[in-house]
Amino acid sequence: MFHQSNKALSAQTSNSLLTLAVAPARVIRGNNILNQAVDAISRLGNRPLVVGGDRTLDIAQSYMQQLLESEEFDFMQTSYSPDCSESSLEVLRNKAQTHEADVIIGVGGGKALDTAKLIAHQLQIPVVTIPTSAATCAAWTALSNVYSDEGAFLYDVALDKCPELLILDYDLIQTAPQNTLVAGIGDAIAKWYEASVSSGHSEQTLIIAAVQQARVLRDILLQKSLGALQSPGSETWREVVDATVLLAGVIGGIGGAQCRTVAAHAVHNGLTHVCGRGSIHGEKVAYGILVQLRLEEMLQGSQLAAAARQQLLKFYAEIGLPQKLDDLGLGNITLKQLQKAAEFALQPNSDIHRLPFKVALEQLMAAMISTTAPIETNRISNDVTSGMNQSKKFSGSKSKKKA
Ligand SMILES: [Zn+2]
């Protein structure tokens, strides 16, 4: 099954050179708009299978009351529990077929939406995504991550297209715990740190555009996140929700498969093998950005990476993103577990190999435990001194366009 999936994946990846999956066909957003979406959904189908998490389905119920009671539809609701895993997908495909579903509606966080998108893709029917938090851009993208029943990341699947309809209801998003938006900020800001490394030198029009959008997204988040978190429901809060749910998706859509993740997501993937569901996706990714910068700092001597890490540490402290393993609930991780996470992150097909240098297991483990290390000022002052000594040559500095 695993090999089959990989084969299907590589076929889809080569197709993605021909097909662009940039955006959902339609996005509806606003306050309390879920109940007004009857028409838009009924154009796609009348026998929806609603896929969500146990908790999110309960919460969404009151926001969808009119929708659920509408005579237009014959609903069936089901949970994706235990995870977006092969066993869940099989059960849900069977339910969809028994119900003769003609449209899938995903309601929930990233995993619920990934599950809904993948079932719709496999059954070749339309999908509607209704995010209940701003924790990821899964409502937008043509990509699903598949996990084990225990929550360990296995592989991702490129889908033919983005969802037919995305409904962003700010009132519903506001019911989610605050830490989901914080995690969404972590996942979204990673776009810049990863895309600038994997695709920063691309000559391709759309990829250049995607990388620049990632920089804009980073700046919006650095400027507005704190204000948004201090006043949920405000204009600034809605702008930050748009940034994490929509703009982050735009970047994945325009950049496509070539504008890929690098070490931050690879570290996330490795961590899911030791902590499963202990923290949410964007929190692990945010920590992974610091690991990636630490690698660039340690192995390339990049002072810009060191400065970017210090800037992010300050930002993380302000908004509550994890700075180190302890903040992810992994303060007591054993050396063996750390090694297991690092080994997974370094698997041959891992995106960590998009870094412009080789990373050894010991180096990755060292970076993972030193994300809060102070900048090595000795080294910098040495560099500066030697730079001054060779001031005639200094114009050709090795600076990267990071910070
Ligand atoms: Zn992510």
Image: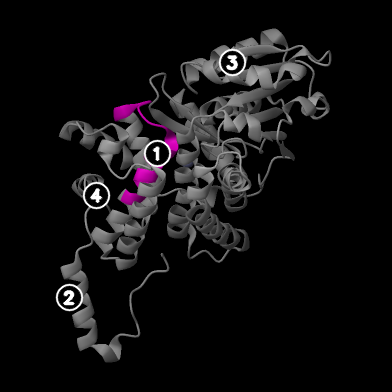
Q: Residue at x 36, y 58 (%)?
A: 311
Of mark 1 and mark 3, the one earlier in the sequence is 3
* Residue nearest the observer in this picture, 75 or 91: 75
Identified by mark 3, the residue type is Asp
Helix, strand or loop at disc 2?
Answer: helix
User: Is mark 1 in CB contact (under 8 Å) with mark 4?
Assistant: no
Spatial CA span between label 2 and label 4: 22 Å
Of mark 4 and mark 3, the one earlier in the sequence is 3
Question: Dot 1, how many residues are within 10 Å of its Cα: few (below 14), some (14-19), or many (20+)?
Answer: many
Residue 367, disc: 4
List x then y, in percent, for residue 194: 44, 53
Q: Is residue 230 at least partly visible in the picture? A: yes
Identified by mark 1, the residue type is Glu
Q: Which residue is mark 1?
A: 283
Q: Residue at x 20, y 48 (%)?
A: 366
Spatial CA span between label 2 and label 1: 35 Å
Q: Is residue 279 magenta?
A: yes
Of mark 1 and mark 4, the one earlier in the sequence is 1
Q: Which residue is mark 3?
A: 58
Q: Which residue is mark 2?
A: 382
Question: Dot 2, how many residues are within 10 Å of its Cα: few (below 14), some (14-19), or many (20+)?
Answer: few
* Residue nearest the observer in this picture, 250 or 199: 250
Q: Which residues are magenta?
A: 274-290
